[in-house]
Image (tube, grey):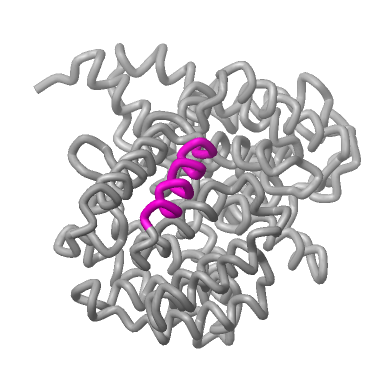
Amino acid sequence: MAMTATDIHRTIDAVWRIESARLIAGLARMVRDVGLAEELAQDALVTALERWPESGVPDNPGAWLMTTAKHRAIDLLRRKKLIERKHESLAYESESDAVDSKSELETMLDDDIGDDLLRLIFTACHPVLSAEARAALTLRLLGGLTTDEIARAFLVPEPTISQRIVRAKRTLAEKQIPFEVPRGEERDERLASVLEVIYLIFNEGYAATSGDDWIRPELCNEAMRVGRVLAGLAPQEPEVFGLLALMEIQASRLRARTTAAGEPILLPDQDRSLWDPLLIRRGLTALERAEKLGGARTPYALQAAIAACHARARTADATDWNRIAALYAELTQVLPSPVVELNRAVAVSMASGPAAGLALIDALSDEPLLRNYHLLPSVRGDLLSRLQRHAEARDEFERAASMARNVRERHFLQRRAAACADAMRSPD
């Protein structure tokens, strides 16, 4: 049966989501400008939108887009005389050389596509950009998302995202950031930046900071997809596999984290039959890989090991909280952070009782970084509730609710405050 115009447009959208990163990466190696590479790739997409409804979808749509983009890139190189610029990878000195070297340029685009993707990841996540700009540019170039999709994902106006992306590409061009994977210490620093951006995207999907939805699975999926690409391109980097393990295991719980109405369900109350066994297996495999590469004590691998303890427990009561508390103690050594200390307090409360956890929480009460962090009073309220100190718990839940920016989370905390009020009226 012949495809309708709607079917063709859906196919084009799907092909673009899959192929755009590869396409932009190959073009960026050629023109040495991420922004220009994206424009050339977009030109090829526009051509597909014009031609495919009449000619039909090619047998290999990705290759068709690549070939079309190649030709446009070569034409642009000739027309704008970019060839006269002294790029090390393009040893051509005149426009006439460009005409003779067309086949060589095409070969360049076909080679080392894996390395090109790695270069694109490192370029999009360059520390010269803000964390917000890196996240937006990564989703745009590697996830193939539109500015509207990114704006909706992060709950900011579309013009804001558009400006971030435009400024990011301009900054990369003006600073003449090389399209390469850096070496030595710079590579280590940039890898940390890359992983930070990927996890930032994942976390925004796993527990949205604001808005009407508590989770946004599409953001988690995009982060995992980029993480898998990176793992395939950097198979000897333990931290990459540690992060991938952490994301896969955490994402396995997504279906169980909310009610049908979208309300949050805390970990102990989740229906574990809804946890995705495939993602758990993949996560555990990635964690094993990180450990074999010597990364067992890296921050992401330690967090993944904590997540693995939950994944291996068939029931909430079977959770090895002593092991989790010990892992958090290790994590505080390699990643000192008040948020990590807060999570350790929760683990200690589960292993040794709420009073032990509350003592650790109270030690964090004056921590400046947690002053506006709603999870501090939320956790404190939970521990006070478990200690039957319902009036204090109600006050903490109300304070947490007033600080929460996510609508679902705010309502959840308000319900917990109301439950404490009910317990005060009915002590039995």
Which residue is at 25% across, 46% downward? 422
Which residue is at 67% across, 44% downward? 124
Task: Pick the residue in front: 156 or 92.
Answer: 156
Q: Position of residue 338 (x, y in %)?
A: 64, 64
Residue 265 against residue 286 in the figure, above or below: above
Residue 47 against residue 15 in the figure, above or below: above
- Judge whether residue 234 can be spotted in this image: no
What's the magenta region? Answer: 390-404
Task: Pick the residue in front: 118 or 106.
Answer: 118
Most frequent secondary structure within the magenta stretch: helix
Residue 392 in magenta? yes
Q: Position of residue 312 (x, y in %)?
A: 27, 78
| Quadrant holding the N terminus | top left
Residue 334 against residue 385 in the figure, above or below: below
Which residue is at 48% across, 49% downward? 396
- Judge whether residue 308 can be spotted in this image: yes
Which residue is at 52% across, 32% downward? 154
Residue 139 in magenta? no
Q: Position of residue 28 (x, y in %)?
A: 68, 40
| Quadrant holding the C terminus | bottom left
Please state if 285 lies on the left or on the right of 29 as rendered.
left
Report the number of discs: 0
Q: Position of residue 423 (x, y in %)?
A: 26, 52
Residue 216's quadrant in the figure?
top left
Task: Pick the residue in front: 35 or 228.
Answer: 228
Please state if 354 lies on the left or on the right of 290 as rendered.
left
